[in-house]
Amino acid sequence: MIPTGETQSLSFRLNGQPLAVEVPPATSLLDLLRGPGGLTSVRAGCRIGRCGACTVLLDGRSVPACLVPAWRLEGRRVDTVEGLARDPHYQAVASALTWESALQCGYCTPGIVLSLVSCLRNETEPDRDRLAEALAGNLCRCTGYGGLRRALERLAPGRPRASHFSDPSDPTPGGSS
Amino acid sequence: MIPDTDLPVQTLGTDRQREHWWVGPETARRVAGRTAYATDVPPLDGLLHGAVLRCGVAHARVVSLDVRGARAMPGVRAVVTAEDVPGTNGFGIVLRDQPVLCRDRVRFEGDAVAAVAADTPEQARAALAAIEVTYEPLPIVGDALSAAEAWPLHEGGNLLAEHTLRRGELDAALARCALVVEQDYRTPRQMHAFMETEGGVAIPDGRGGLCVQVGCQSGHRDRLQLADILGLAPEQVTIRAVATGGAFGGKDELTVQPIAGLLALRTGRPVRLQLDRFESCRSGIKRHPVVARVTTGCDRDGRLLAHRVDAVLDTGAYASLGPAVLENYLDHATAPLYRIEAYQVHGRLLYTNNGVAGAFRGFGGNQATFAVESQMDALAARLGLTPVEFRRRNLRRPGEPGSRGQPVRWTRPPAELLHLAARSPLWRPSPGEDPRWLEGTGLAMGGQGNGLGDGLPDAGGGRLNLSPEGRIRVEFGFVDYGQNLTELVIRRVSEALPCAPEDIDVVLGRSDGPDSGPTSASRSTVVVDQVLRAVLPGWARRLCAEAARRAGLPPEALVCGPGGIWSRTPKRRLCRYRELAASLGPVPAEHRGDFPVAPGPTPPVGRFLQLLIATVARVAVDRLSGCVRVQALHHITAAGRVIHPPGYLGQIEGAAVMGLGMTLTEDMPTDDGRYRFDNLDQYLIPTLQDAPEQRVDVLDDTPADADYPVRGVGELGIEAVAPAIVAAIEAACGVRVRHLPVDPDRLLAALRDTEHPV
Amino acid sequence: MTTAPLPLTVTERSQMRVLSADGPEAAWQLARRHRAPLVAGATGVQPVWERQARWPACVVPLSADWPGFAGVTVTGDRLDIGALTPLASLAGAPALARRLPSLAPFMDRVASPGVRQLATLGGNLVAGGDLSALALVLEAELRVFSGAGWHHLPLSAWPGWVRREPGALIRSVHLSIPRGCPVVLEKLGHRERFSPPRITVACARLGSDVRVAVSGEGGPVRLAALEARLARAGGQASAADGEQALAELDWGNPGLRAAGGRLIAHLLGRLTT
């Protein structure tokens, strides 16, 4: 018989709705969301906080859900892409990523979306550099991040970025080709 | 000199090119997190959870195995060992030498000895802990170079395959060389590191057979292997390849299918088996590490005369696709882009206890190209020629046979790519250099073929139909693991039929659907194009004919269009596809054809449809630490028409960054046969900040009605990245790196030797 | 104090018990009694447990709600930072940004944005993480609770460097950064972001005093011998001096020491310009 640890009554808000569960206190938020939470956009990639595929918003800021134990969750607010359809930051990010086709397999994409939403919400000046920094913990193995870079240009328009391809004597963006 | 203005070049993804940019509905679904993956737990009654006991030792005899304790554990529904495999206890695409469950011997740490199905994952893991196994250690074969003389891992010894490609009289040619360069090269054991680990669920069909929903690369081939293992007829096994979070060759071989299938048949209940990252790292396949000595010589004018390669590939404990990787390595090691009077390219594939190596994007080719292109730079430097000029003197021209005497079909002359690479803006010195960072630019070229090659059976088909709801259903056996395949099919059909993207349902990866052949070897795009060109016109005519009959109009007056059939003038919709489906019923059309090979009576050698790339890299080397930053990569490709720009661009960029990882940080070393790393905190793949700015220039003017207008570009982008980066490092700091990944400590030490005494 | 030994580890996360305490003193007692680790953000320990598939039978979480455990307070040159302050808050704290302009860009290289929301300053220092070189050159003091009650402890004496046992509980970190005291720091990893540290170097100048510390593969350490040499040589040192200082401590491997020496000399140069 497996000795079962104690469980804990826990309530938090998931995508705006209250959720009450009875779980072992060390259950990870990742397992909570994929299990009792019934969500599939939050994905396991490494389970040690190193890939970003399980990124969620905890009280509005992006965190890897696999490193958030249930004992830290009481009364807090958790958001995933499923609950953000009407959020203007989400809409901007989703449309930029979609238009730039900034994904291939898409497994890492919801996590990337949430890291960007978190940056747009919380940073005082979410310029391209800050948006790029916001993705430092989101690994993508498919795209080489090219589509993401183009999506960031769309999300934070501004002066053309200094490019190794631009020629000071060539007025066309991207240089001659 | 080739004037630029005459070359048909377009830069993908730029504003000027955006009129061809199109993004389909599947992309939006993935952004919103609505696509279901193999990892998702299906809502199935009675679902059990599987777990696998892996031996954790590199090489041992299994002295005893006792699962009685595990069988008595709570929630356990089945415990299986080698005794329980009803059919062939072995799998492998080339040789079935990898046991599903090991009986008396284990050959790498990920070898499976037993498996459990239980009500919960925790119960399954607890049961594994109750299995008692005694191992008697055997000598570890940890070095491929000496493996042939070491303890044999399989009957017949550790030399699994040996092959030589020859042309001309090597010794005579070598004797005539004015200059000969001999160097050793090493490439790492790279891990695929797909974001979604291997997993799936096996569901008994109640009639003795089963269906496996899994992240894989070839439903049809998996079905044949799996049926053999399970002692079933192929018709009793169905594979449903669900959306897969990356594969890159790492899911080409069977992964969880055999054990999940075994447990499902045993229990009569659906069994889910999902590897976590630790287990994936320890049991999954890797890229073949290659150690090669390469000797290349030329005459006084820089004309290549002789080229010799002696390579050893470490295939690990089992063959998987190793023999095919060896073939492709050797093919690329002949330096196919260059005219060489004589070569002798020799490779050996060895069994060791170092995990298992198999298919990985590039498939041995990029390992060979790393050495070949590095040799070109070495000869150029010794002759005092630029890398561009040296290559220019040796590149083959269209119309010439390939390096193995076989017919090849390029879409542009290699010299044009070289010319464009030489004009890359990345060669401009950057203003305001920081003295800490040494900057440099380098280039490399690469060629690659589509298809399985060498005359291997390589057929592929697809199917078109009209569903009762009036949906245009397009079916292929391929798996969409992130290559934008669904989007590509939608785009191709919606443009060619034509119709609205929303009219189309793409159904992929079902072993009871059409067999398209494996989703590998950059072949899907070619097969899709071939099938659609064969069936679409006739299929459209059948729909138009029926619509014409209903409307009392001549069929020539009608065309397919968004939502249904339209009259040409005035342009209006006459009937919906749904109405046609009601009156016509299903309208099946199927095509199956062989993958294009060279025309002619001789058996095919190598690959016929060829693609080209030139990659220019700009790097900065940190004088303080030896760290390398790749600042920019510029690719020029010649691979036929671009069907789906975002897909093409993403494939080149993604493969290039994968190659960058292999060049700078990625390796899975082994210590006494055991992998040193087992998760993404230790095995480091590039982050966004490691990825450079990239530009992809496509050189193409292939007409749409050409014989072979498109090529698959899934592997092209990785081909020339590593040699381009090391060339740039040399340009920056004078040190040539020939062992990958680049070790910053060693680079710094070499850098210090080149500096003036401190 | 002796307690009956409890099973220290379990094999499933779900079997782990969480012992909650009302305050730091009670937490310390609980941890002692149950031989349970005290955990803050737990971003460092959870991966270790997950990898080993062995979890402590119980843990005692610390709470950011306890007085003094979170937030940055400034009094003159003195900074009091709660040990449970998330790393993400450090980069954004205006009081810190004013005195340590090099901190914010450095923080981008510490873990990842998501992990920085969870990981704490105390946890980073206890593990000898990226911030320990900086804390060492700033001669950080810890406010700790242990069997000896509440007291201050210089970071350099923190027993957690050598054995991570629930010997003491950190409430806060105290440093003083005099105005005009330049501090430079840099991390060298295996890749550009989210990398385990190879070497982190921090240098600070307080008046004529130049301080140097490193952390990373060889562990956190203040380079006292090098500082003494710097005092004699007007604050400048060569790469060879830096490398030798690391070698004398047998810090890291020789290849990394070469890089470390160059980085130290480079940062010392920036300190004076």
Image (cartoon, rainbow, N blue to C red):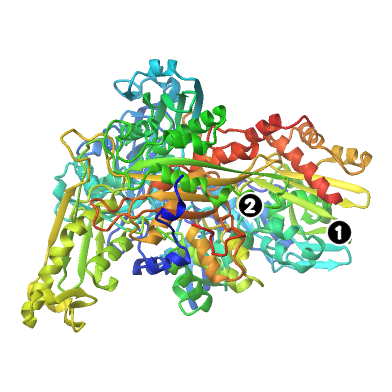
Q: Amino acid at mark 1?
A: Ser
**Residue C244 on image: x %, y %:** 79, 32
How many other residues sit within 10 Å of disc 2, few (<14), some (14-19) or many (≥20)? many
Labels 1, 2: one chain: yes
Residue B24 sits above or below residue C112 on the image: below
Q: Which residue is mark 1?
A: C176
The chain that hosts pointer 2 is C
Q: Which mark is residue C115?
A: none
Secondary element at tag 1: strand
Q: Residue at x 68, y 60 (%)?
A: C87
Give the chain of mark 1. C
Say how many tags the image has: 2
Q: Quadrant of the C terminus of chain B?
A: top right
- Up/down of B704 relative to B549, above or below: above
The answer, for residue B141, to whether it is visible in the render is no
Question: Going 36% across and 65% down the picture, which residue do you hit?
Answer: B35
Circle 2 — which element? loop
Q: Nearer the viewer, residue B445 or C78?
A: B445
How would you rate the neighbour count of disc 1 (Cα within 10 Å): few for under 14, some for 14-19, many for 20 or more? some
Q: Earlier in the sequence, mark 1 or mark 2?
A: 2
**Residue tagged 2:** C36
Residue B573 shown left or right of residue A87 in the figure: left
Residue B694, visible in the rendered structure: yes
Task: Identify residue type, mark 2.
Answer: Ala
What whole-number distance in Å separates the C-alpha atoms at marks 1 and 2? 33 Å
Q: Mark 1 against mark 2, which lies toward the viewer?
A: 1
Going by the image, does B436 lie left or right of B632? right
Question: Residue A137, how many percent across, how many down?
Answer: 56, 57
Q: Could you tell me residue B23's position as x and y percent?
A: 38, 67
